[in-house]
Amino acid sequence: MAKLTAAGEELCYLLDRGYPLKPASTFVGNHHLLSERQRLALARITSPSEALSKRRRTMLPRVPASMVLDGFNTIITLEVALSGSLLIEGMDGTIRDMAGLRGTYRIVDKTVRAVELLLERLDALGVRDAAFYLDQQVSNSGRLSALLREEAERHRVDVRTELSSCVDKELYRMENVVTSDAIILDNCLSWYNLNRGIIEDAVKDAWILRLPLRRQAV
């Protein structure tokens, strides 16, 4: 933890001075002899101050009546939480997983429970309608879409699913977005931190790495 925290603060220092993430994380990772997994964690935890300020401005303080969800991003994080695998807390307050989605996805035993938790939370928050955007090119996206619609029949929230060839760009200029994807957060008009509340309330034993990073003066 001490080594990761020190490396994280050094990475933040470089990001705040305009260094691109990839070479900066490589430089810091080499200096601290970090593993590839540790470097990935730091890259997903840290953000430049300018990006964090923008995300704070666009984060919704209250629950919107309608939501647009980054489907795989949201559901996989809940699956990871339910599986007891490692999660990380970003400096922007989002909870991220360490899983990689590279075109393949399988519906696993935790998927149905993750969808149930998600829809139960939307009901409890009084969300009227929710649109789930799923990457069309990812395997089993159609099956996940069908599962979402089937489970939604037992809930009040009105759910629709959209299969898209480029979910990121679809969400870039939308409001009321639910995601932990940093690039989407930097481009969308507004976002709501849904998964954090679900995990903290319903998966109390979730394994979450939190680093006590301090911002450096620029």
Image (spheres, rainbow, N blue to C red):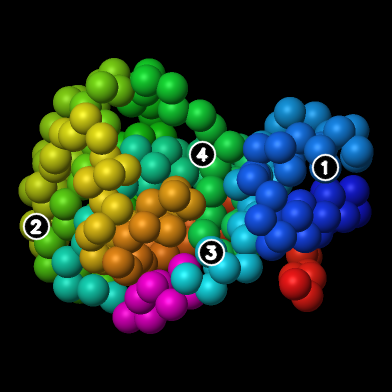
Location of residue 169 by image quarter: top left
Which residue is nearer to you in this view: 162 or 79? Answer: 162
Residue 10 placed where, x, y %? 82, 55
Crowding at mark 4 (Cα within 10 Å: few <14, some 14-19, many 20+): many
Residue at the spot of label 1: 28
Q: Amino acid at mark 3?
A: Ala
Residue at the spot of label 4: 80
Residue at the spot of label 3: 51
Residue at the spot of label 2: 158
The image shows a total of numbered marks equal to 4
- Report the mark closest to the observer, 3 or 4: 3
Give the SS element for disc 3.
helix
Q: Earlier in the sequence, mark 3 or mark 4?
A: 3
Above or below: residue 7 compared with residue 140: below
Q: CA distance from mark 3 to mark 4?
A: 26 Å
Give the SS element for disc 1.
helix
Q: Is residue 200 visible from the viewing direction of this image?
A: no
In percent of the image, x 44 and y 50: which residue is there? Answer: 183
Q: Earlier in the sequence, mark 3 or mark 1?
A: 1
Residue 176 placed where, x, y %? 26, 66
